[in-house]
Amino acid sequence: MTEKTEKKQTSRISPIFKRAISHLFHKPATTKYPSVKPVLPPDTRGKLVYEIKDCNAIDFGSGPDFRLDIKVMRGSICHVCERDCPAGAITIVEVDGKQRPQINLNKCIFCCQCVDSCPRGAIKQSDIYELAVTDKASLIMKPKYSQKDASQ
């Protein structure tokens, strides 16, 4: 017998079949995502959270009653978040006579540049990562005052 016939006789089981059999005894590579939520790292870049009461306000450390609006002092608003957004996902709209940022999560690339550059900390990141919707209009975060914010 030659060496070629010996090799053919020893490799009757295909390498693919051997690998498939070996995977039957290993832990699955996938996770059980919908039923078991993953543990997220602390620096997860999730949905942006916008707090309208903090935007364009200067706090002098004298409590929530003593706040001034930058527009009154400077004549214009900050616009830093709109300027620094690389995707152009932030536009400035008028709400109750004041200009506030409107965030379009359709365009957002979740780089969190707006979070880093906001001087007042009005835009924050959260760990909300499930943003699938059937209506794209619901991904536009329109700034609005709640009744609680209006009383403060």
Image (cartoon, rainbow, N blue to C red):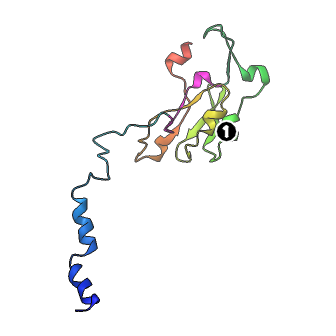
Determine the residue located farthest toward the right in the rendered image. 74
Quadrant that contains the N terminus: bottom left
Labels in figure, total: 1
- The answer to whether residue 64 is above or below residue 41 is above
- SS type, badge 1: helix
Residue type at mark 1 is Glu
Query: Closest to the observer: 98 or 88?
Result: 88
User: To which quarter of the image does residue 83 belong?
Assistant: top right
Taking the spot 23% from the left edge, 71% from the top edge, the residue there is: 17
Taking the spot 31% from the left edge, 47% from the top edge, the residue there is: 31
Query: Closest to the observer: 40 or 115?
Result: 40
Categorize mark 1 by other alpha carbons within 10 Å: few (<14), some (14-19), many (20+). Answer: many
Q: Tell me the magenta residue range.
A: 43-55
Residue 117: % across, % down: 67, 33
Residue 130: % across, % down: 41, 41
Quadrant that contains the C terminus: top right
Query: Closest to the observer: 27 or 123?
Result: 27
- The answer to whether residue 86 is above or below residue 15 is above
Residue 86: % across, % down: 65, 46
Residue 147: % across, % down: 50, 18
User: To which quarter of the image does residue 33 belong?
Assistant: top left
Taking the spot 25% from the left edge, 65% from the top edge, the residue there is: 20
- According to the picture, the residue beneath numbered tag 1 turns out to be 82
Taking the spot 59% from the left edge, 39% from the top edge, the residue there is: 112
Please check the rendered image and state whether residue 119 is part of the magenta-colored stretch, yes or no.
Answer: no
Q: Is residue 127 left or right of residue 95?
A: left
Please check the rendered image and state whether residue 53 is part of the magenta-colored stretch, yes or no.
Answer: yes
